[in-house]
Amino acid sequence: SVHAGWERVITPVPPTPSTPDEPEVHRPNGLVLDEHFAYLIGNDDGLIRPEANITRAEVATIFFRMLKDESRNKYWSKTNSFSDVSATAWYNNAISTLTNMGVISGYPDGTFRPNAGITRAEFAKIAVSFFDVNVDQTLGTNFTDVAGAWYTKYINLAVELNIVNGYADGTFRPNNLITRAEAMKIVNNTLRRTPHKDRLLPEKDMITWPDNMDKNVWYYAVVQEATNS
């Protein structure tokens, strides 16, 4: 899970200077960008399960952890209107605070469904909510399966911000439940982290996972980036 045994370890990372010839890079508001700490931990069995699904509560907790202190303090809340998020739930503060920020929302029936999986479209909407960009003025994409839906403009913006990718067949598959590896990829992109398998911590100093040892898998560096401070 992502809620137990987490400790914030701060390692300052100086920002990379830009040059006048570089295109504008939008940066998210309210998220920690200048400290590099792990935002995801493994399960009790020592596995990270990159190809498993991630729950809506876990996603809220990840972004809650990545909030700057001033943002967390400004929008801090312990209450929400969801019928299935109790005040004593481990994820209550995260969901209540991010709801107060306007970053996440529930369903028309008044539920949040914290233990349900989250779709790729829902995740894209959360990620772009941290950027001060007009979502109604986005350009279209070449995805064959995102037009004419509630999520179209959010996915379009996520593409423009370089935080999501589609599949080789030209689809985005917006209604598919997102995997933990895909979620980590989007969070890394949102935080402007660009990991590479050859530029990680030395193996003797790095937390590794029995189910993420193949360096040739697309998500190897993504997972290591998300789970190491």
Image (cartoon, helix red, strand yellow):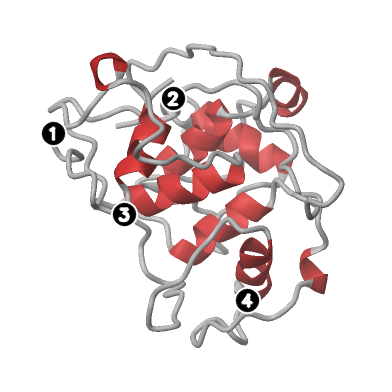
Residue contact at pointers 1 and 4, CB within 8 angstroms: no
Numbered disc in front, either 1 or 3: 3
Pick whichever of labels 1 and 3 is earlier in the sequence.
1
**Secondary structure beneath disc 2?**
loop
Instruction: Find disc 1 in the rendering and name its residue.
Output: 210
Q: Position of residue 117 (x, y in %)?
A: 35, 55
Q: What amino acid is at disc 2?
A: Ala
Q: On the image, which quarter does residue 197 sit in?
A: top left
Q: Give the camera-side residue of 150 and 190.
A: 190
Name the residue at 60% across, 72% down: 151
Name the residue at 66% across, 32% down: 31
**Secondary structure beneath disc 1?**
loop
Q: Give the camera-side residue of 121 and 162.
A: 162
Instruction: Find disc 4 in the rendering and name its residue.
Output: 152
Residue contact at pointers 4 and 2, CB within 8 angstroms: no
* Image quadrant containing the N terminus: top left
Q: Position of residue 109 (x, y in %)?
A: 53, 62
